[in-house]
Image (cartoon, rainbow, N blue to C red):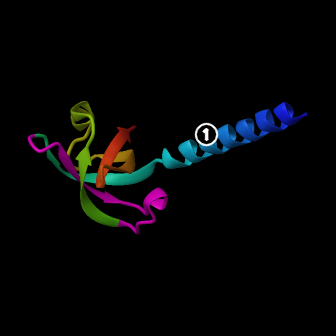
């Protein structure tokens, strides 16, 4: 019986982790204002970043994967994921 309770507890923790991970990957709409490929940075005018509890604004983000910059052009509308990576706001996904 004790082993069954441990397995249920572990399963519940894993489920919570998956749910949190899905929340962290929430896409936000924005418009690319500037791409700085040399510095791996992009300026985006974005809607509320709910996962980071941040209101809509225009700001500069680091880009984790330089290949993502190839998919961003000034003036283009994008949907992106931003996360704190080593304390820096970073775009980790774009669609």
Secondary element type, mark 1:
helix
Give how far across and how far down residue 44 sits, in percent.
Answer: 27, 55
Q: Quadrant of residue 65?
A: top left
| Residue under the image location 68 percent in, 39 percent down | 15
Task: Compare residues 68 and 39 and report the one nearer the observer.
Answer: 39
Q: Quadrant of residue 21?
A: top right
Task: Compare residues 31 and 62 and report the one nearer the observer.
Answer: 62
Give how far across and how far down residue 62 sits, in percent.
Answer: 23, 48
Please say whether residue 52 is one of the residues in the magenta stretch: yes
Task: Compare residues 72 and 85 and report the one nearer the observer.
Answer: 85
Query: In the figure, 25 relative to 56: above or below?
Result: above
Give how far across and how far down residue 78 sits, in percent.
Answer: 35, 45
Residue 4 vs residue 43: left or right?
right
State the quadrant of the C terminus. Answer: top left
Please say whether residue 14 is one of the residues in the magenta stretch: no
Query: In the figure, 2 relative to 35: above or below?
Result: above
Give how far across and how far down residue 84 sits, in percent.
Answer: 35, 52
| Residue under the image location 48 percent in, 57 percent down | 51
- Of all residues, the one furthest to the left in this rendering is 38
Magenta stretch, residue numbers: 38-56
Residue tagged by mark 1?
18
Q: Quadrant of residue 8?
A: top right
- Of all residues, the one furthest to the front in this rendering is 2
Task: Compare residues 38 and 34 and report the one nearer the observer.
Answer: 38
| Residue under the image location 30 percent in, 55 percent down | 87
| Residue under the image location 36 percent in, 39 percent down | 94
Residue 77 vs residue 61: left or right?
right
Q: Residues within 10 Å of mark 1 (few under 14, many from 20)?
A: few
- Of all residues, the one furthest to the right in this rendering is 1
State the quadrant of the N terminus. Answer: top right
């Amino acid at each position: 019986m004790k082993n069954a309770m441990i397995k249920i507890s572990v399963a519940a923790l894993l489920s919570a982790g998956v749910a949190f991970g899905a929340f962290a990957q929430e896409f936000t709409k924005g418009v690319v204002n500037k791409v700085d490929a040399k510095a791996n940075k992009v300026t985006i005018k974005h809607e509320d970043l709910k996962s980071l509890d941040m209101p809509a604004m225009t700001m500069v983000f680091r880009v984790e994967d330089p290949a993502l910059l190839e998919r961003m052009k000034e003036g283009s509308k994008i949907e992106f994921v931003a996360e704190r990576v080593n304390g820096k706001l970073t775009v980790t996904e774009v669609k």
